[in-house]
Amino acid sequence: MSMENKAKESAGTERMKHIKIGIQPTGWTNDDFPEIGNDTPYQLILDQTRQTGFVGGSTGHNYPSHLQSLQHDLQSRGLGITSTWVGTQFTALGGYDATLQTVRDQITFLKAVGATDIVVAELAAAVNQVRTKSVLTDRPTFNEPQKFLLYRGLNEAGKMAADEGMRLSFHSHVGTGVQQKEETADLLANTDPKYVWFCLDSGHIQFAGDDPGVVAQTHATRIGHVHLKSVRQKVVDAATNDNYSFLRAILEGVFTVPGDPEGSVNFDPIFKALFEANYEGWIVVEAEQDPHQTDRPRSLLNYTPHTPFEYAEMARRFIRSKICL
């Protein structure tokens, strides 16, 4: 190996020390639809998170609310918290001040568990949790006064986080008013880069019809948090053509983990964009799935099912092959 290549490898290794690899509980259970995997003990999720080589994840709805219990369960396994999730309501009537209080509460929680990231999405009028509406076509579209409230609220919440040494990242999400790449670009152009970062979610971007690699390259310097998920394009096509709800899309297998050969997201340009921007922070596997898919007859599935543990192993191998972590 030449001296130049050795220097590049050394620099890359040093940079990777500032990246943490996590996995969300959504492969085992689901916060939007708690009946999915609700019988999965949170201790099992934590054990399998550790066993498959990840160093953390966010909390799920069935995790203990007693802070000391949660701290003990995490510390005994050497795990950390990647972030907390806040569904903001800045554009809803009476939602602005309540959202800011929620952010304050989450900052207190984050400090207690040693985490530094807050991931937010504007859920006012969103349809991703509505079981009877199309996740792609029934979503809200924000007018200019609503955008003003959203962007001002994000700047204010982001400054609150930054003042405590934390980073707030906005998540574009199917079924919400910020779903398409143009809406994401407008939000990032009209918020303060010191306070508002971008949570890149490869699965949601491709589900919405955009190219996650292009979005990653376009906004590389604003990426503050990463959710890696792939999609089964045949399910995306069916969901688009037949106006699936978000619940139906999940149960039909729209999302899968990076490394699943049935997934269609090209992750190479995403990793390239992250490395070229010297990204530091969490890269988190997040694939909302039905953990009981292996119990269903194969004839009723459009894909090859695996257990949550097998998906976690699959994703960890894939990420390790890309960034040696």
Image: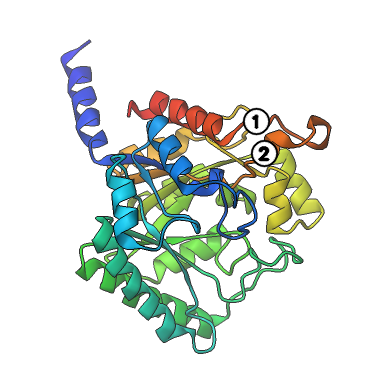
**What is the three-letter code of the residue carrying label 2?**
Arg
Q: Is residue 280 visible?
A: no
Q: Is residue 218 above or below residue 137?
A: above
Q: Residue furthest top?
A: 1
Q: Is residue 301 above or below residue 112?
A: above
Name the residue rendered at 76%, 66% in the picture.
132
Whole-percent x and y of residue 139? Answer: 66, 69
Whole-percent x and y of residue 291? Answer: 62, 41
Q: Is residue 119 visible?
A: yes
Give the camera-side residue of 316 and 261: 316
Specify the quadrant that holds the N terminus. Answer: top left
Q: Which structural element holds mark 1?
A: loop
Residues marked 1 and 2 touching at CB (< 8 Å): yes
- Mark before the other along the chain sequence, 1 or 2: 2
Q: Which mark is residue 305?
A: none
Using a 10 Å C-alpha cutoff, classify the residue at mark 2 as few (fewer than 14 neighbours), some (14 to 19) or many (20 or more): many
Q: Is residue 77 left or right of residue 201?
A: left
Q: What residue did someone put label 1 on? A: 262
The part of the image, by quadrant, that contains residue 50 is top left
Specify the quadrant that holds the C terminus. Answer: top left
Give the camera-side residue of 289 and 139: 289
Q: Is residue 232 left or right of residue 229?
A: right
Whole-percent x and y of residue 134? Answer: 74, 63
Using a 10 Å C-alpha cutoff, classify the residue at mark 1 as few (fewer than 14 neighbours), some (14 to 19) or many (20 or more): some
Cα separation, mark 1 vs mark 2, equals 6 Å
Name the residue rendered at 63%, 31% in the picture.
306
Q: What residue did someone put label 2 on? A: 232
Name the residue rendered at 51%, 60% in the picture.
172
